[in-house]
Each structure stands twice: as C-alpha cells, then as structure tokens.
Amino acid sequence: MMGKKLVLVGGGHAHMVTLARLHTFLEKGHRVTVIGPSPFHYYSGMGPGMLGNTYRPDDIRFRTQHVVEKQGGTFILGKVKSIEPEEKQVRLESGDAISYDVVSFNSGSYVPRLNLTEDAADVFSAKPIERLMEAQKRILDLAPKKKITVGILGGGPSSAEIAGNIWQLVRNQGLKTASIKIFTGRKLMSRFPERVSRKVEASLTARGIEIVTNGYVKKIKTGQVELESGQTYTLDFIFLAMGVRPNPMFKNSGLPTGPDGGLLVNKNLQCAEYPEMFGGGDCIYFHSQPLDKVGVYAVRQNPVLYHNLMAALEGGPFQAFDPGGNYLLIFNMGGGKGILKKRWLLFGGRPAFFIKDYIDKKFMKKFQAIE
Ligand SMILES: Cc1cc2nc3c(=O)[nH]c(=O)nc-3n(C[C@H](O)[C@H](O)[C@H](O)COP(=O)(O)OP(=O)(O)OC[C@H]3O[C@@H](n4cnc5c(N)ncnc54)[C@H](O)[C@@H]3O)c2cc1C
C-alpha cells in the first residue's frame, strides 16, 4: 500500500505527542512533513520566567527540527501563508506549495500590532516567545545606564506576568528600579473573578508597578503611547499583551472559521467541510464549546489529535475531544512568587510558584527526553 502524506503546520503544544510518535507514521509507510518558522518551539508557560531570568532559553524550548529529522520526517523552515483546500496543499510565505493527504494545524496565535508601524523600535509582543528573549537583552543593555520606563498594554495574565518578571529581572541584576506601568484600559484581569483580580493587582502594586485604568491606548509609536483622552506617556520599552488571535490564514483562505478567525473544527478536532484537515491549540475554534486560549487545552488535545491523524491515514474510528472541567491556573508573578487558582481555591506566594515551576519543568522534561 502506498503511504500517504501527513503535513503538520506548526509544532506547537497540541502536536507534542504526534511529534514524539512521528516514527509510528513512518513505520506504516507514510511521509511526514513539519513546517515551522523556527527549529525550536518555545513553551509559553515559562516565557515570562525566561524574561525574568529564572530560566534560560534552552530550558524552555523543544528542538522540533531535530526531533522530526531524527525520526525520519522532513522539517521545512518556513511559515504557512495560505491553504488551498481543493488542491490539498498549503502555500508558504516563500511561495512554495506543500501538498498533503492529511494536514493538521497547530500554528498558535499572535498579538495584533494595533496601528503600529513595522519600524517601531523597542516594541515587543508577548508572542512569539522569542520576542521576550530580545526584550530581555535590550533591557539589560539599557537598565545599567538609566532608570528604565516600561509600558505593558493589555490587562490579562500575560501582562501581569511580564510586569512581575521585568521587575524581577531589573531587581536581581542590582540595577536601578524600573518604572513599570500596565495600560489595562479599564480593569485589570476583568475576565476573572473579583478576588483573583484583586490579588494580582495587590501583588503588582506592592512592587510599585502602576496600573493605568483611565482609558485605552489609542496610538503607539517608538517610545510613546497615547491614550484615547490624548494623554501621552514616554516609555523606553513597550510590550503588547492585549490578547491573541489565530493567524488570519484560515479566513483569508476561505476556510470555515469561528468568530475569532480560528479554523472551525468539530468534536474530533476535524474540519467538517474538509475532513482531511485537523487542528489544535490556539489556532482552532472548537465548535461544541468555545475554548479559552490557554496551553492547557492544547496539551489536553494531544492524544486525540495523534489518534485522529492516524485514523485519518489508516482508517478507523475517530476519538472525540473532551475539554474536561475547570483547569488549574498559576501565574508567575516574578520574585519567586505565584498566584494559584483552581475553582474556589486561590492562594499566592512562594508555594504557588513552586507548584508551577514543578509542573512546567516536568512537562519540559517529558518532551525534551525525546530529543
Ligand atoms: C506570555 C504568555 C504566557 C502564557 N502562560 C500560560 C500558562 O502559564 N498556562 C497556559 O495554559 N497558557 C499560557 N499562555 C497561553 C498559551 O501560550 C497558549 O494558549 C498556547 O501557547 C497555545 O499553544 P499552541 O500550540 O496553540 O500555540 P503556540 O505555542 O503559539 O505554538 C504555535 C507554533 O506554531 C508555529 N507557527 C506559528 N505560525 C506559523 C505558520 N504560519 N506556519 C507554521 N508554523 C507556525 C510557531 O512557531 C509555534 O511553534 C501564555 C501565553 C503567553 C503569551
């Protein structure tokens, strides 16, 4: 029997099991191609910790290209720009077309750049995580020379984690304290229960981090943000952490999408209109129940995605994805402290960070072992 072509777009959190077991597809005679813009995949849960210098880049990344090639798969360094579903091919930014029999998307999400020009300097987005590496370098260049000013746009967990870890970075280097402001528009952590937002806010303000709630940012340029009211702030570094969106490639390619532009998938993580198309993580819109854009769901989707890709190639019944119940959230607030929330349980301090650090390192170890 002639093997089929499996293409994985992005080696994100939902493809970890499939990547670890890539050899099982090859053993059955199929060809596997993985496309990604970097030879590495960064574990976002530890991204702010890397910014704060708790972890080194090596601690938080998987060698995707190496893992693929070691098992006999093909790795293409590139970015998918569009999908041509009738021709069963994906088109890369380079113009090359890669054909598939079965394709799976785990290409994540990005932070919209508002009306920012491409040449704006010292503006960093929360994703891709590689940007946080560049930010750390720039901060460490400037902070010994002056008291740096940092503005973080957005009021969710990644904003809070970035603020707390910049505070840690500067403090641990024995540098002049930084002036850090979070521009959250109205309210910090507004998607969360009141007691969670109060706890996060208390942790930040205790370190002198200012939370600006008098209106949204209207304009950004190098070194400056302007609020709707016209008030301006001068900043050395600007971070964009206003929430993420799936890559527009699905919508632009005319595929079925959810309201956020994510690839619309059914309970089998499969596109109903093109059953040879699957996906997981932040880039999909799960039809049965919209999912929060958190790594937890991507991680839970792993075994189902692996099973269903194999079933699509080999025949056999599909598995349905069960998002599961309430999930554990732990924010890394910097300074060795965290805030843990699960259902009614909420606590902060060192034990919360200790648990996060333990879980995150365990996850990394499990998948780095394949390397
Ligand atoms: C700062 C920060 C901290 C976070 N902390 C947590 C946390 O502690 N816990 C939690 O549950 N969630 C956390 N999240 C949310 C979490 O990051 C996402 O939900 C998670 O990354 C989704 O995983 P993913 O695999 O879908 O996407 P990603 O992790 O973004 O992976 C996508 C992959 O696809 C590749 N790719 C992108 N575009 C293309 C393309 N066009 N073609 C080919 N490949 C492409 C990328 O290089 C990347 O390797 C955090 C987010 C941020 C920004």
Image (cartoon, grey):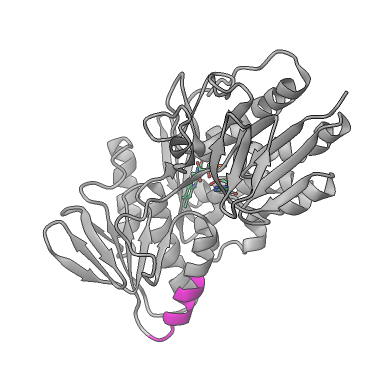
Give residue 118's quadrant in the image.
Answer: bottom left
Q: Of helix, strand and loop, which mostly describes the magenta segment?
A: helix
Residue at left offset 30%, top offset 52%: 202
Q: Please indicate, yes or no, whether residue 154 appears anywhere in the rendered image.
A: yes
Residue at 60% in and 40% down? 90
92 in relation to 148, above or below: above
Closer to the camera in the image, 325 or 29: 29
Q: Is residue 150 left or right of residue 161?
A: left
Left or right, 127 with reference to 358? left
Relative image position of residue 54 (x, y in whole percent) = 56, 62
State the image quarter where residue 159 is shown.
Answer: bottom left
- Asked whether residue 371 appears in the rendered view, the answer is no
Q: Nearer the viewer, residue 113 or 138?
A: 113
The quadrant the N terminus occupies is: top right
Which of the 4 image quarters holds residue 115? bottom left
Query: Could you say which is closer to the camera, residue 31 or residue 360?
Result: 31
The single residue placed furthest to the top in the displayed view is 317
Q: Look at the image and give the residue range highlighted in magenta.
A: 136-145
x and y percentages locating residue 254 in the rendered image: 45, 32
Image x and y of residue 364, in percent: 67, 48
Please say whether residue 288 is one of the residues in the magenta stretch.
no
Please say whether residue 143 is one of the residues in the magenta stretch: yes
Q: Picture coordinates of residue 204 (x, y %)?
A: 33, 57
